[in-house]
Image (cartoon, rainbow, N blue to C red):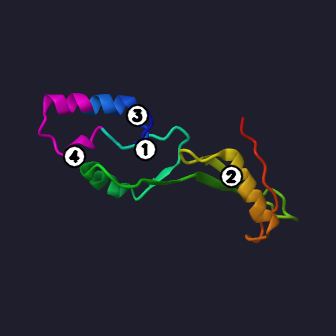
Amino acid sequence: MSTNIPPHNLGELADTTIRLVENPTLSTEELFQTFQGPDFPGGGIILEKENLLELYEKGEGTIYIRGKAEIIPSKQEKEKKDLIRITELPFKVNKAKLVERISQVIKDKKIEGLKSVADYSN
């Protein structure tokens, strides 16, 4: 079977289910006290998190996520080479394709200042 339902934290889901069995009249807002929404295995940041409540009430909608990155300043004084380190990728993003796309952006010089891409993940 396949589904478009994103993965969730099993502990949160179990706790929320128990609360709902004990009190079937709980509102969606009250359920969100123990249930925070989807839990993506690769990480990422959920955008427009304030819309999650409405999404769960309607039972349909779209969740937008993006990767998490940090900029590491260069330690070299002469030639600044800051590093952008991507630490989390959104659910279902293919890492190899992402590296390939970044390489193409560098090759086409679409973003000034990008010099190279390297994959240090294991």
Quarter assignment of residue 101: bottom right
Residue tagged by mark 2? Answer: 98
Residue tagged by mark 3? Answer: 9
Q: CA distance from mark 4 to mark 1?
A: 21 Å
> Quick one: SS at disc 3?
loop
Residue 52 shown left or right of residue 22 in the figure: right
| Mark 1 or mark 2, earlier in chain | 1
Quarter assignment of residue 50: bottom left
- Whether the residues at callouts 4 and 2 have beta carbons within 8 Å, the answer is no
Residue 13 pos. (x, y %):
32, 33
Label 4 Cα crowd, 10 Å radius (few <14 / some 14-19 / many 20+): few
> Quick one: SS at disc 1?
loop
Residue 20 pos. (x, y %):
19, 33
- For the view shown, which residue lies furthest in the front direction? 1
Residue 63 shown left or right of residue 30 in the figure: right
Q: CA distance from mark 4 to mark 3?
A: 17 Å
Residue tagged by mark 1? Answer: 4
- Residue 28, which numbered label? 4
- For the view shown, which residue lies furthest in the right direction? 78
Viewer-proximal residue, 94 or 40? 94
Foreground: disc 2 or disc 3: 2
Q: Amino acid at mark 4?
A: Thr
Foreground: disc 4 or disc 2: 2
| Mark 4 or mark 2, earlier in chain | 4
